[in-house]
Image: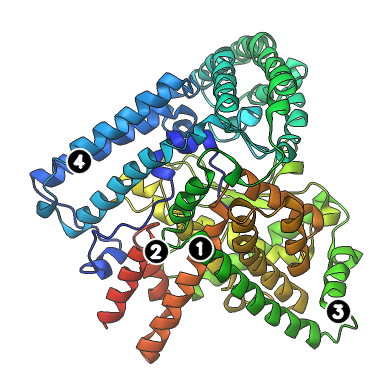
């Protein structure tokens, strides 16, 4: 998965909301778009449109200062987002005003590319307004992120000048206001019945308690642990003392307040059920999320059935490998063997990290076989921070800064290496790093002719669909030669198919958490520890996990069609250029691009 966007940020950043299909664009010119040559409207309508884009982007940066800092826009680097209810309504009014401005643009006067930009932008803001009615901004945190891990922004911003440190100190000194606004949202959520299930909220107290420590041991103090050469020792000592004081007098007391609120008010109000159906308008909310995340008009029932079909198909492929190994036992016995035999696990976090690093370096030189365009921006491999490692997934990707000041990073989970199998390392690396998330996201950011909302926004069905499709490229990259590694690749594909079943099962068909866990365990070789974390992730983030498999199926369908219709003229590098050349787009737009490319031959 790519870097998590938490629920509070999703209502604040409409451009990263996953969009539904929008049918205003035409297949005409799609092949040109895929070549990274973007035709802009050289007229008044085009100028008017791009002025709206620029104004809206300014709103996004101002309203989301930590995200802006992470992108390299440091103008708001001294503050947190304003999470007050008044601010929520103000931002909604901004979105409505942007749509009103957009309606005044003469659509017919725009170039084909700007008509697409118009359509995607319009849908972004319409969907933000539609989602607002369900009021899930009142659930501003979950076990995978929120204010209890707000220190994480320190890993995504530079600390090289006195101004950087002064900004950080200002942020620390205003943390109590940020905390009060978060608690106010949660209190309102209690009143309205919008609250997470108890089973996932039970993970939060330990995360909050981890922030209550001595100031110099706090993770918020980490920027002061090493003096940059650009700052003299005396100045840095003064800054460090100011930072320590701010953490001791503002940050840690704020976390103590959160701990009391959580124990005395929030946990007693949490619900026993796990599905979003058991919240106000939950059924309708989930239906909207399914369409949004998949960029299709599929219903939850249709997604569930697709999942069951994929589980059966992949199960057959897995059985072929088991048979080739002449394993003496049932499918369940083989999964137990994979989960328990020491040969499949590293003994130490250090050995596990070395395996991730070596695999990454082994893949990179093979990419030119499949891709004509590779990103200029490099990526690195880092461990997931200890504070969140027990409660998060096996790995995730964090994109590069917009200004090139920070590389992309593939974060890997080294917590409990004894439950992180070696046979998953190749497939996981392909998905999160290259040719998966880093290749796609870094290339999109380098499409300089695209508006900012397209370069740095995205559609989960495309982004995660590409990541899952990339896993299938492992054979062509010389991976999966070991049958267990190939089984690991199928396990990951099965994992995404299982998601279609258990996510819709819990949130729409009233499945219990235990039902979802057992279905997962019965069909995939992932360790039970990971399975439980995954199920709890789906509970906290309804609908998001559906995007992976739906997107992958569409990309595979389009590749098969291209190979069939072009025959000897099919060029895999050209196909990938078409798929990636317009950035992340809805699946319908992707299909138009590929069809236009096929027809151009």
> Can residue 428 be seen in the rendering of this structure?
yes
Looking at the image, do the residues carrying marks 4 and 1 touch, with CB atoms under 8 Å apart? no
Q: Return the residue at label 4.
A: 102
Quarter the C terminus occupies: bottom left
Looking at the image, do the residues carrying marks 1 and 3 touch, with CB atoms under 8 Å apart? no
Q: Nearer the viewer, residue 363 or 124?
A: 124
Mark positioned earlier in the residue sequence (4 or 3): 4
Q: From this view, report whether residue 37 is shown above or below residue 372.
A: above
Mark positioned earlier in the residue sequence (4 or 2): 4
The crowding category of the residue bearing disc 4, from other C-alpha atoms within 10 Å (few below 14, some 14 to 19, many at least 20), is some
* SS label for mark 4: helix
What residue appears at the point 79 percent right and 62 percent down from the top-left corner? 421
**Number of on-image labels:** 4
The crowding category of the residue bearing disc 3, from other C-alpha atoms within 10 Å (few below 14, some 14 to 19, many at least 20), is few
- The mark found on residue 587 in the picture is 2
- The mark found on residue 465 in the picture is 1
Distance from the alpha carbon under mark 1 to that under mark 2: 10 Å
Q: Position of residue 75 (x, y in %)?
A: 40, 24
Looking at the image, do the residues carrying marks 4 and 2 touch, with CB atoms under 8 Å apart? no
Mark positioned earlier in the residue sequence (3 or 2): 3
> Can residue 436 be seen in the rendering of this structure?
no
Q: Nearer the viewer, residue 8 or 263?
A: 263
Residue 95, quarter of the rendered image: top left
Distance from the alpha carbon under mark 4 to that under mark 1: 30 Å
């Amino acid at each position: 998965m790519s870097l998590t966007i938490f629920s509070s940020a999703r209502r604040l950043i409409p451009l990263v909301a996953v969009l539904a299909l929008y049918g205003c664009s035409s297949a005409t010119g799609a092949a040109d778009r895929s070549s990274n040559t973007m035709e802009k409207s050289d007229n008044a309508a085009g100028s008017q449109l791009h002025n709206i884009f620029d104004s809206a982007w300014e709103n996004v940066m101002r309203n989301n200062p930590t995200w802006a800092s992470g992108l390299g826009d440091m103008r708001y680097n001294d503050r947190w987002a304003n999470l007050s209810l008044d601010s929520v309504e103000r931002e909604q009014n901004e979105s409505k005003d942007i749509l009103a401005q957009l309606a005044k643009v003469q659509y017919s006067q725009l170039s084909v590319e700007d008509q697409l930009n118009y359509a995607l932008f319009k849908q972004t803001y319409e969907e933000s307004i539609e989602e607002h009615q369900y009021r899930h901004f009142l659930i501003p945190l979950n076990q995978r992120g929120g204010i209890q891990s707000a220190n994480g922004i320190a890993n995504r911003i530079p600390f090289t000048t006195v101004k950087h440190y002064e900004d950080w100190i200002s942020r620390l000194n205003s943390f109590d206001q940020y905390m009060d606004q978060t608690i106010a949202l949660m209190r309102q959520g209690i009143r309205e019945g919008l609250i997470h299930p108890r089973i996932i909220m039970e993970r939060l107290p330990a995360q909050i308690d981890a922030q209550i420590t001595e100031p110099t041991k706090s993770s918020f103090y980490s920027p002061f642990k090493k003096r940059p050469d650009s700052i003299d020792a005396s100045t840095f000592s003064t800054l460090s003392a100011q930072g320590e004081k701010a953490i001791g007098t503002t940050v840690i007391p704020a976390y103590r307040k959160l701990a009391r609120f959580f124990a005395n008010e929030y946990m007693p109000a949490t619900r026993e059920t796990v599905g979003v159906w058991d919240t106000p308008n939950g059924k309708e909310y989930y239906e909207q999320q399914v369409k949004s995340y998949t960029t299709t008009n599929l219903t939850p029932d249709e997604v569930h059935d697709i999942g069951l079909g994929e589980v059966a198909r992949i199960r057959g492929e897995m059985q072929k490998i088991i048979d080739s190994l002449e394993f003496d036992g049932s499918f369940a016995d083989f999964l137990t063997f994979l989960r328990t035999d020491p040969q499949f696990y590293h003994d130490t976090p250090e050995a596990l990290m070395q395996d991730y690093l070596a695999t990454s370096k082994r893949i990179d030189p093979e990419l030119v076989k499949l891709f004509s365009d590779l990103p200029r921006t490099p990526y690195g491999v880092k461990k997931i921070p200890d504070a969140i490692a027990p409660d998060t997934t096996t790995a995730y990707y964090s994109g590069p800064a917009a200004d090139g000041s920070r590389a992309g990073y593939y974060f890997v989970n080294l917590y409990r290496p004894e439950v992180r199998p070696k046979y998953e390392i190749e497939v996981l690396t392909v998905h999160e790093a290259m040719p998966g998330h880093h290749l796609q996201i870094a290339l999109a950011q380098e499409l300089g002719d695209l508006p900012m909302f397209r370069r740095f926004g995205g559609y989960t069905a495309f982004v995660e669909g590409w990541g899952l499709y990339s896993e299938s490229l492992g054979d062509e990259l010389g991976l999966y030669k070991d049958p267990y590694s190939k089984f690991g690749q199928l396990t990951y594909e099965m994992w995404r198919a299982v998601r279609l079943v258990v996510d819709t099962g819990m949130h729409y068909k009233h499945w219990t958490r235990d039902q979802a866990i057992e279905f997962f365990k019965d069909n995939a070789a992932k360790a039970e520890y990971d399975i439980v974390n995954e199920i709890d992730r789906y509970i906290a983030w309804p609908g998001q996990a559906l995007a992976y498999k739906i997107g992958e199926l569409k990309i595979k369908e389009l590749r098969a069609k291209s190979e069939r219709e072009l025959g000897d003229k099919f060029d895999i590098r050209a196909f990938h250029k078409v798929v990636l050349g317009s950035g992340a787009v809805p699946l319908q737009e992707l299909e138009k691009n590929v069809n236009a490319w096929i027809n151009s031959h």
